[in-house]
Amino acid sequence: MRLDMHCHTKEGSIDAKISLTEYVLRLKKLGYDGMLLTDHNSYKGYRWYLRNKDNEEFQNFTILKGIEYDTCDGGHILIVMPEDVRLPILELRGLPVRLLIEIVHAFRGILGPAHPAGEKYMSITNCKYYRRHPEILREFDFMEIYNSCVTPKENEAAALLARQYELPGTAGSDSHKSDCVGLACTEFERPVRSESDLIRYITQEPVISCKGSHYAGSNRDHLGAAYDFMLRLFYLYNKASGSVRRSRREIEIEELLALSVNLKQRLRETQLIKLLQQQFRSRSRRKRIRRQLYAEANSAHFLTNRSANSGLE
């Protein structure tokens, strides 16, 4: 089964120029069986698909729910959650990568670095956190080893890292424009029809083939030296956007902790309490969170609520 595992659409990503309908028609023409929809910090594109999934162009084609999350310290991370799990916090950019890993794993999802050896600020190996803690790569479930929008050398470095850390590799076009669609392909040996299928395949039997070709129409190719300035602007934008969403993240984190015994246990076991407390401005809220983490768990397993329920409609 052939999938493009890194796709952006104008319904969900503000910097994308291609609609989901056009994306699907182009992939079908190229012989693809499906795609992983990974808009930036948003499920808007996938929600649009759910409202229009009975359209003729979407028949006999698999569209999976994913997201590309902007961390505050580890670049862009691709995330796949089970179809029965909804986490609003994943639409609020700015979490630290270490905390993001614990949240995603607590709710049975998988995640991996996008273009891990690519541009500064956007790619994990070009971020300060990785330079201080390279062992963080062991915590991921997969790694994007072929991305059409980065250089062949950067893809080679990503593939080397994946082998070093024994991570399954995926390939994605990272398309934002129509002429980039279909330039990367991830092939699976058996059908993948749902997010749970994809999660099981990657974590249990990762026999995956990746291939593609370089896209010469990216901003890096067009802007030249000015691209470095644009990267700096992106860094400032990401920091500012993450700060704006901090209050909403606080609410979502408290709700997850209140109703997820699984998440609380993971945070206690991995000694991430200090990192979690740093997400809260108020000293009293930080103390309350600490007490909550050490409180007796009143459930045998994690519970579901607004932040982890079925459906995205």
Image (tube, rainbow, N blue to C red):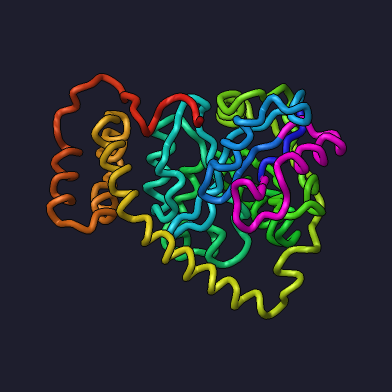
Left or right of 122, for residue 188: right
Left or right of 313, for residue 28: right
Left or right of 293, for residue 230: right
* 77, 92: nearer the viewer: 92
State the residue at coordinates (15%, 29%).
296
* 157, 115: nearer the viewer: 115
Q: Quadrant of residue 17?
A: bottom right
**Residue 32 among those drawn in magenta:** yes
| Residue most extreme to the top | 300
Q: Quadrant of residue 253?
A: top left
State the residue at coordinates (78%, 31%).
57
Q: Quick one: quadrant of the N terminus?
A: top right
* 45, 165: nearer the viewer: 45
Query: What's the magenta region?
Result: 7-34
Residue 218 is situated, as x and y percent measured from the top left of the image, at 74, 63
State the residue at coordinates (63%, 58%).
15
Residue 76 is situated, as x and y percent measured from the top left of the image, at 54, 54
